[in-house]
Image: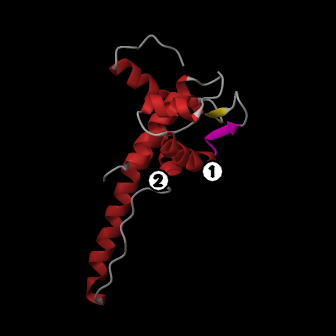
Amino acid sequence: MKVSSRTQFGFQILCYLALRYGGAPVQGSELATVTGTTEKYIGQIMLTLRASPLVLSSRGAQGGYYLARHPASISLYETLLALEGELPQFEPLSGFASQEFLNNSLKVMQSLLTASLANPLKAHTLEDLVRQGQQASGFGDWVI
């Protein structure tokens, strides 16, 4: 499975918003700077995230983006679904009726793939992701 750059930037944005949780809204220009991408691309990603229940925005000179709830209450599963729309799926194959057992084998594979991705992602939160990232970078003492 290959994760799109859009999803990767989306996770970076959500982690940054988690770090800034409870503070002033974060402007798109700041998100572009910290992620190293363009403000236009940030705007496209934020359209998707604002359509989800994860991110809110406010207008005006002091406006920007912020998490809709505490990072400890946002599962990684929710974030992946918000960015990708769904977990990877096998497309049904057309073929002969004698291939039904092969297609059923793919259904079993899909079930295993979904469970192996969904269960750990449901068990971990955005706060967990940020803390582990901080610890890996040597910033384990920071508080979200």
Quadrant, the C terminus = top right
Instruction: Determine contact: label 1, label 2, CB under 8 Å.
Output: no
The image shows residue 49, relative to residue 126, as above or below, that is: below
In reply to whether residue 83 is colored magenta, the answer given is no
- Asked which quadrant contains residue 20, the reply is top right
Pointer 1: what residue?
51
Q: Position of residue 79 (x, y in %)?
A: 51, 43
First to last magenta residue range = 51-58
- Asked which quadrant contains residue 102, the reply is bottom left
Per the image, label 1 sits on a secondary structure element best described as helix
How far is mark 1 from mark 2, CA to CA? Answer: 12 Å
Residue drawn at the location 59% of the way across and 49% of the way down: 47
- In terms of sequence position, does the residue under pointer 1 or pointer 2 come before the other? 1
Q: Residue furthest top?
A: 141
Closest to the observer: 12 or 97?
12
| Left-right relation of 116 to 68 | left
Residue drawn at the location 48% of the way across and 13% of the way down: 142
Q: Position of residue 126 (x, y in %)?
A: 50, 33
Per the image, label 2 sits on a secondary structure element best described as helix
Residue 134 seen in render: yes
Residue 134 circle label: none
Visual colour scheme: secondary structure
Please name the amino acid that badge 2 sits on. Glu
| Left-right relation of 39 to 105 | right
Residue 125 seen in render: no
Pointer 2: what residue?
84
